[in-house]
Amino acid sequence: QQGGLECAVVIDDRFAALLRFRDAPRAEGQSFIRHLGPRHQVERVLLVSGDRESEVRYLADMVGIEEVYASQSPEEKVAIVQRENLRADTMFLGDGINDAPALMSAAVGIAFGQNSDVTTAAAGVVILDSSLQRVDEFLHISRRLRTIALQSALGGMALSAAGMLLAAAGLLPPVAGAVFQEVIDVLAVVNALRVASAPGRLTDF
């Protein structure tokens, strides 16, 4: 129930000790899981692993994950991701070659750590330094990028519509209308450049 790999030590045919080796969760794992909902509107977090039930359950309890799927094959991982995709867009974070099919099936696949070429090719996002802080930064950058893209698109369409109305009313000559459209395009590009100048520290956990 405590998870890990147990190794019995026998000396001269007599039991001497029992050693238990087990994985330890990342120090920031629990705080990262806790802040996903309030900060990134993540509805559910699942731990899907090919490891034994006892080990997976132990790690899940340590970081606060309630939904656990242990001893899963690559095909079973894909089935879980596809099922979850029917409910909402799914982000899958994987660090092994067995995760490659699931990474491709998710709406967003993140290859985590020093992965094989297969895993890296299957993912839409690659985070090389195995840091949950980098994952959080990616989520913030994605949200900022989406916001700025919507601002540019909606703002550009609104200004273009205003220009067409002015031109239809005879208040905007053709030459001025052409210049006005170029100004709109420049403003959209300048607004998009804000993505490269994120203010302050991105991560917040």
Image: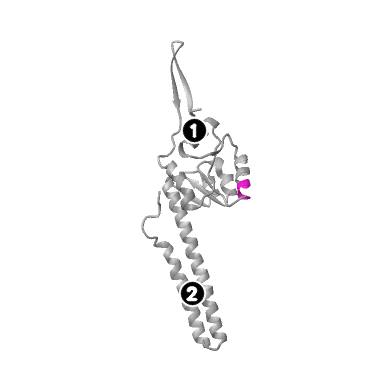
Q: Amino acid at mark 1?
A: Tyr
Q: Earlier in the sequence, mark 2 or mark 1?
A: 1
Q: Is residue 136 magenta?
A: no
Q: Residue at x 60, y 47 (%)?
A: 84
Give the vertical position of 187 relative to 18 (above or below).
Answer: below
Q: Principal SS element in the magenta part?
A: helix
Highlighted range, magenta: 82-86
Task: Give me the residue at 58% from left, 45% from top.
Answer: 102
Circle 2 SS class: helix
Seen from the viewer's position, the closer of residues 128 and 201 is 201
The image shows residue 170 at horizontal and vertical percentages of 55, 89
Q: Residues within 10 Å of mark 2 (few under 14, many from 20)?
A: some
Disc 2 residue type (three-letter): Asp
Q: Which residue is mark 1?
A: 58
Task: Look at 48% across and 76% down and name the residue there.
Answer: 184
Residue, far left: 200
